[in-house]
Every structure is written in C-alpha cells, then in structure tokens.
Image (tube, helix red, strand yellow):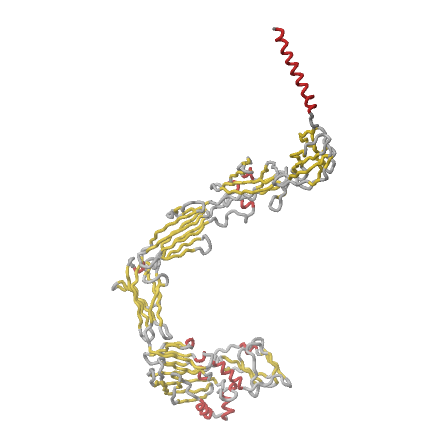
Amino acid sequence: MRKAVLIVTILLLAPLPFVGAEGETIHLWSEHAPGSVLLWDDAGNLTAVNPDQPIDLQLPEGNWTLVRLIDGIPQDNAFVFNGDTNATSFLNQTIESPLAISGSAHLDVLGPIERLVEMNATWSSSISIPNTLGHPNLPNAHLGITHQITNQFGGNSSLFIDWAISQSEIGCCAYDKIDMVGNANVIAFSDNTSWGWTTEANLTGQGDGRSTRLLWIPITGELGDSTDLRITLPSPHEIRYSPQSEYISGLPDDFVIHRGDIAVTGNATIALGANVAPVTDFYADEGELPWVSIGPPTQIVSDCSDSSIAEPAAHFILQDGNTTLLDEQTSTIIIDSMFLNISPSTWLNLTLECTDPQGLVGNHSMEIYIDGILPTRTLQMQYLHPDDSAPVDVDYGNQTISIPSGAVLSGAVQAGDDSAPPVDIEWTSNKSSGWIQLGIGNHAWNDIFVQGAQINGQHLSIEDRHQSKPLTVYSLQLNLTDTAGNIQTQEWEVTITDRTVPRPRPALSIDGNHYGDLNHPIEGESPIDVNLDESWDDIDAITQLTWTVELNGESLDVGTTWVDVQSFSLPDLLSGRHTLVVNATDSSGNTGTHSMLFVVEPPIGALYRITEVVKVGGGGPGDPGALDVTLENDGQGESNFRLCYLTDCTIELTGVEASVDGPGQMTHRISVTEWASGEIIVKIEFPDNTTMEHQTGLLVQSEMTPLMWMLLALPPLAGLVALWRLKRQPEDKAA
C-alpha cells in the first residue's frame, strides 16, 4: 500500500539509536508478533521493530513510546512506558475507528480530444491528514504535525500553512506524454485533529500526431497519491485501455483510479478514444445455432463486447412474425418451446441489443429454426469369427444381440436430419474404460469382443477354475444428435457366447515323481499316472466337459466323464517315444486338444541278447578260426562282459547302452584256437561269473573224402538191392 511506503520513508529518515549500549536497560516484550508499530525514546529517536516476530528488546532506561500503525497512519492511543513491560495487551486492543487519510481528486477533461489540438481540463483535489502524522518534508514526521509546528515554526500555525502552500504542487498530469500546465490555487489548513490542503487549477495539454490520446497519471508515493482520482471525459469519448485496469472502476467516461492501491511508482496510463457501439453476438449454450431443439429448453447466451471498462447491457427479443414471444433485459434467455407454445419446424427471429453506458447500441439478429424431428439413420451390424468363412448379420432390432467370443463386431451407420448440418454419431460401451466411437454424418467401426475378466483361467485356484462362470454381457449404445440437440438413442445388451475351446492340461507322474522337460523319470516297466486337475474351460464347470484320450494314435478306454479321467494310469509301455492326446469338449461343442510327447527310457542294467553269430572261415574240428558275434543291449547304464567259445574268450568288453531310439548294438570277434565238433555255443560271461549261453545252430564237422562218401553210400545201395530181389521172387514163382 502507498501509505506503508510513507512510513518506510519516515523510518529511513529517522536516526536509529544503538540498542544495548552500556548502562541500565529495560525489557520490552510481547507474546505475539506486533504487526506495524513505531517505537521511539524521549528524544524522538526511532528503534526498529520486526513486525513479524514477537518483541524481545533490551532498551536504555527512560521514557519510551509505542504506537500502532494502521494503513501507515500512527494511531492516537500511544503506549508510554519506562520499565520492564509486556506490550501484549496493548497490541491486542481493537481500534474501532482508526485514523486515516481522507480526500479526493478530480480531473475534468473539457476537450477537445483530438490529434494535434490543445486540450483543456480542470483539476481539483483535497487531502486531510490526521495530526498524528507530520509533514514528510519536515523532521520527525512520526511525532505528528503539532510537534513539527512547535519545533519548526515556534508554534505559529500561519507560518506552517504558508510553508505548506509553498511545498504543494498540482500533482497532475501528462497528456500525450507531455506535462499539462496551469496555475494552481492552493489552500492549506491545520486544526486540532487534522491538517492538509486543497488545490484547484485550469490545465492545458497538447495532442500529438498519433491516432490514440494518452493520459499519464503520476504515482509518486506522496501523500496526495493516497486518495482516489476521478476522471471525467466529454462525450463521445471514453477510456479504451489501461495497463492498470485492475485499479480502475466506474463508467467509460466517468471513472476512478484508486491510486493508493497501486504498489509501484511511475505513471498510470489511460488510453482515450471515441466511443463506438458494442460488438454483439450470441450463441447456444448447448447445440449449434440456428437450430434449436423443440425438446429440452435451450439457453442462449449473449456476447456483448465493448472497447472500454464497463460491460454493455444485453436485451433479447424473440419474435414469431409480428408476435413478440420474449422481450427481456438479460444476458441469457431460455427458449422453451413447450412453454412458449411453439410448433415444430418453425422459423423465429432472435435479436440481441447491446447498449453501452453512453447509450450506443449494437445489435445482432438471426433466424432460428425450431427443430422437432429426431435424426434418422441407416444401420448395419455384422460379426466375423476366425472360425467362420463369412460375416454374420446381426439383428439389431432386438434389445439383446449375441456374438461368439473372439468375434469382431462391426457397425456402420449413416445418419441424416431434416436440418442441414450433419448429425453427430456416438457409440459407447462398457467393453473397456473410455470405449467410445465418434463420427459425423456417417461412421463405421469394428472391434473384437471376448469374454470378460470373470471367466476361468490359470489366474484362479484349481477349485475356482473348475466352477462354471456366467457369460459376459456388455452394454452398447448408439446416440445420434442433430445440431438442435435432438437425440435418437438405441441400446443393446451384447451377450458373448462360448466359442472358446476348453484347456485340457494333463500332468504325468511316475512313482510319485513329476514328468517334465527337466525331469524324465520314466524307466522301463514303471507305471505312468495321468492327472488332469490343471484343466479348465472358460465358462463350463469341469464336470460339464466330455473327454477322450488317445495314446500313440489309438483310443484308450478310460471313460468320458470328469470322474473317469481326472486321474488314470497308462498301460505298460516299452521304452521309446510316445504321444498322449487328451480332448475335452464343452457344452457348446467347442473341443480343446492337448498333445504331449513323452519318452520311456530303457531300464537300468545289462539286458543283452545275441542277434547274430557268423563263423569266420571253413575250418573243421581241430582247426583254428573265429566267430563274429552281434549283440543288442536293451538296458542302460555301464556294464562289462566277455564273450566265450569253449575256453576261448575275449577281453572284458564295455556294453553299448540302449536309448529311447532303440537298443545298443555291437559286434565283437572271438578268436577260436581249435574248433570242436558239434554245435557252436557262445557264452556271455559277466563279472560276477554268471553266464548266459546262446545256441547258434552252427555245426562244426570233419571234411568228407571219396572213400567216406562211398562208405556212406553202401548201406542205401544194399537196401535197394535187397528190396529189388524181394520183389522179383513172386514173379519167378509164377513163371
């Protein structure tokens, strides 16, 4: 505030004593921050007091005076003390009618306000200052004017008045940046309660060549600036603009500058100009003119803008031909077709008149159309599921439509209205947060619709995912809005039918051990258990599903119900690779399949069998030779053996392990020292001295000479001769 600046000046000009000097002191304190106060000693010397912290001062002994400030004016209830003092009660006192500076100033611009022409004005001002505040150009203003008159003028008020008149200036103004000139008549006064002066002057200023006239009002921080300044202008001129407009009130040609509220020194700038009529327009609070709905009432808002500081007055007139329906002095009107008994498809005239404070009028008229016909539309809706070959038309005439989960729903609408502008199209749904589709005139969209978050899935516990869940139902709404605000609405419930396959999830275990990618515990002849607890369907309960199981392409007869298939065992399997397929079908006919490949590993141990023995060479009994023996091992794990023929054996051999792809195969040679006559028998000899014999079916015999062949032929020849002779005897007797 400008009055606070005055006190700052007083404090800067006053000498400040050194507090805490040698000698006795007295203590001044308060329980709360004091606000703005002045503190001085017997000699009038000021001591600074922080207004924002509680007082805690050690002062030299003597008489001290504490005075409160309100808006920079010392109040007359001074507190005098000379000992240790708590000032809290004094500071908390309420001052009902605080002392204040009063007065006024008036610049009456007579004119003319024109380019390159001299302008005339009159100036008058008055100010009354409480006696508790002295003249700022004299010492110790904080001690009051009476003290100053006594000390500076020997108590002679007339001398002070003459001096005060000599110190006074007009305090106004500049015109087009050049100070206005004139002779002032100043009258000063001083009485028991206040002092001050009045000023009157005739002023002149010179307009320059610019198109805009400027007034500069000095803001200097002097006492005279603490009062309001009224400025009046001759018709048809007005204030056009001011950077200090927040400190200006009143009418465009008769306004007030609140100088005491301006916090900085400088100039308040006032741009002057000839008054022009307000710029006039209006608009519908909702909707677009000239179209007005016959349904809900429509609010029409005025837009009256003027180049000056005051708002023009708005006046609406609504007419149907020569009949006036509304005539209201207001900034807004409500057009309620039902209340005004207006028929649909009617054209009305709406006029707005905006009048500024000086009487100039701007007006705006529009023919508005009362639209009573809802928008129309052509609609097409289809869905396409990935499993379908062609889109399916949706019967959008029903309030409920059904589409399969995973289908893409599409909508296409072309909208029209009896009024010219296009229709706003809005689709909304609770399918997802903020789901909305917008268009104008015509619009098409598509989006995939699936079951909602409430369905079964692996995010649930096994018990929860085995329970049935309801089908998801979404809302879908189409709003068509014409420019008048008429709304055509259609709503649907979109039921998502079950088109998602069940999820069979078989788990294998062997002897209580889980079978998986990182754990292959299946060994030959171990039983394999299957558990389907991890399976689920998105909608149906697990007990509603039907099941089939296949192993290596062959159906397994384990049953078709959940009770049957929840857990079962596979038949004994040979080592190798096997495929298990589990199919689950829900009540909607959707079939889900899970196919898994698992392996049965060979058993641990040496499971040898000789598959082929080849005799090397043609030697007979007593001759040397060799045998090539081919073995297969159906077991896995490290094992050792020897191959033997009679007493001839190989060194200790390491067996080739079997794998899931088949037995381990190997061929080893036995060097034979001497063949024995008869069948060749090969033995597998193990480290624990156990053996396994293999009869090869191969014979070892001596080589046949001609004599041996003749000896072998004699018995059959003798038999033939004997038989022939026996046959001849009956024939000889008959002869």
Rendered location of residue 594, percent (x, y):
53, 43
Rendered location of residue 109, percent (x, y):
35, 83
Question: In this rendering, would 378 be left or right of 155?
Answer: left
Q: Is residue 510 among what the camera can see?
A: no
Rendered location of residue 607, percent (x, y):
67, 37
Rendered location of residue 206, percent (x, y):
36, 85
- Classify 373 as above or below 659: below
**Residue found farthest to the left:** 322
Q: In which quarter of the image is the C terminus?
A: top right
Residue at horizontal 56%, vertical 47%?
A: 461
| Camera-nearest residue between 521 and 547 | 521
Question: In this rendering, would 247 be left or right of 276?
Answer: right
Question: In this rendering, would 575 be left or right of 678?
Answer: left
- Total labels drawn: 0
| Camera-nearest residue between 624 and 93 | 624
- Classify 520 as above or below 334: above
| Camera-nearest residue between 124 and 735 | 735
Residue at horizontal 37%, vertical 48%?
A: 397
Q: In which quarter of the view is residue 441 placed?
A: bottom left
- Classify 663 as above or below 148: above
- Classify 82 as above or below 309: below
Q: Is residue 489 among what the camera can see?
A: yes
| Camera-nearest residue between 608 and 426 | 608
